[in-house]
Amino acid sequence: MPQKAIPFWFMRGGSSRGPYFKRDDLPTDLEALSKVLIAVVGAGHELNIDGIGGGAAVTTKVAMLSPSKLPGVDVDYFFAQVGVTEKIVDYKPTCGNILAGVGPAAIEMGLVAAQEGVTRVVINSVNTGAKVEAVVQTPGGHVSYAGDTVIAGVPGASAPISLLFMDVVGSSCGALFPTGNPIDVIDGVSVSCVDVAMPVVIGRAADFGITGKESAAELDDNAELFEKIEAVRLKAGALMGLGDVTKSVTPKFALLSEPTQAGCTIAARYFMPWKTHPSMAVTGAQCIASCAVHPDTVAHGLAVVGEGSPLNVAIEHPSGEIDVLMDFTVDAGVFTLKTAGLLRTARLLARGELMVPGGLGV
């Protein structure tokens, strides 16, 4: 049976990478869609040798875009996390790094008309319902990828893309603290189960037998650590109302420690959850930042938090640091996040047709 061709745009978004598709070019049925995306990535092999995945969770991500019918919104962004060594697809989470490429991709695809100077693209994250405004550099009415903005985990410099996140508290579980508590004790350790842009189970590094300053490679070699993390994560997932998360990448996991760099708020190691993130997820950063500024979480005593709002929260990670501009209030223990802003970059790497085996419903 002949192979089928699908138009695609291959982009780096933030510190992640993957194909961006028009949703209409793919099957509407999720089971059929999963088969196509598994073939696209080459899931089921550590090198993704029969697809365009890069053998890591940050390079087996997929974005699917379509015009939005929501008032005041330009584009619907549907995200899929495809497995690396397993033939699985998870539609529960979103990805803030891949989101950084949505604005440029929407313009490249012709879904949004470029303006002179900058183009503002309002995005609906289909997976979580969050709204994000992306500000894309478009001098002369064309997307520019050239600039002097540097982000940790990506070599070189590129044009800045500003992301302003709205309505991200309780995006998946319906509450800032889905368990009803700012701190829960699971398997004898204290964790904060937080849902801001991404459900994350957050603990103290010392409670899991590490310093929190280890490299991603050092942590990935620590099988005992991952066994402890997974045991806690599975129980936390049930407490957060997510059910059996054995095969789901949510909730994610993070471990905190005191910052070592001047001007930083907190140090964090973020887990995806079965591998250590080489830098930091955009969604995870918002959740960690919220945990850091809330006075009643496991971050208390570790985070160096300034006063007032908006407040810049600088998070140390294995590749450097990421800044989250938090506009929030904490009144009588009630945390209200107005917006969270981040600066990212993206680059179009390739475009054309991607081939998948025939008979997959494309």
Image (spheres, grey):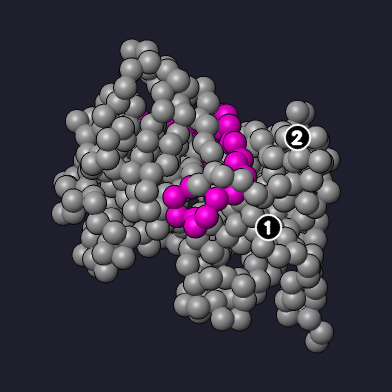
Kindly identify which residue carries mark 1. 348
Residue 218: give x, y in percent of width and height.
Answer: 26, 64
Q: Is residue 194 visible?
A: no
SS under mark 2: strand
The type of residue carrying mark 1 is Leu
Q: Determine whether 312 is above or below 321 in the image.
A: above
Q: Is residue 23 magenta?
A: no
Tag 2: residue type? Gly
Name above or below for residue 2 compared with residue 302: below
> Is 272 positioned to the left or the right of 27 in the image?
left
Whether tag 2 and tag 1 are in contact, CB under 8 A, the answer is no
Residue segment shown in magenta:
151-180
**In which quarter of the view is residue 49 placed?**
bottom right
Q: Nearer the viewer, mark 2 or mark 1?
A: 2
Could you give the CA–CA distance between mark 2 and mark 1, rounded to whole angstroms? 19 Å
- Give the main secondary structure of the magenta stretch: loop
Q: Residue at x 37, y 62 (%)?
A: 275
Q: Residue at x 77, y 55 (%)?
A: 22
| Residue under pointer 2 | 117
Residue 122 placement (x, y as % from top left): 70, 34
Residue 179 magenta-highlighted? yes
Of mark 2 and mark 1, the one earlier in the sequence is 2
The picture quadrant where one finds residue 41 is: bottom right
Instruction: Tell me if 194 is positioned left or right of 358 in this view.
Output: left
Point 49% across, 55% down: residue: 154
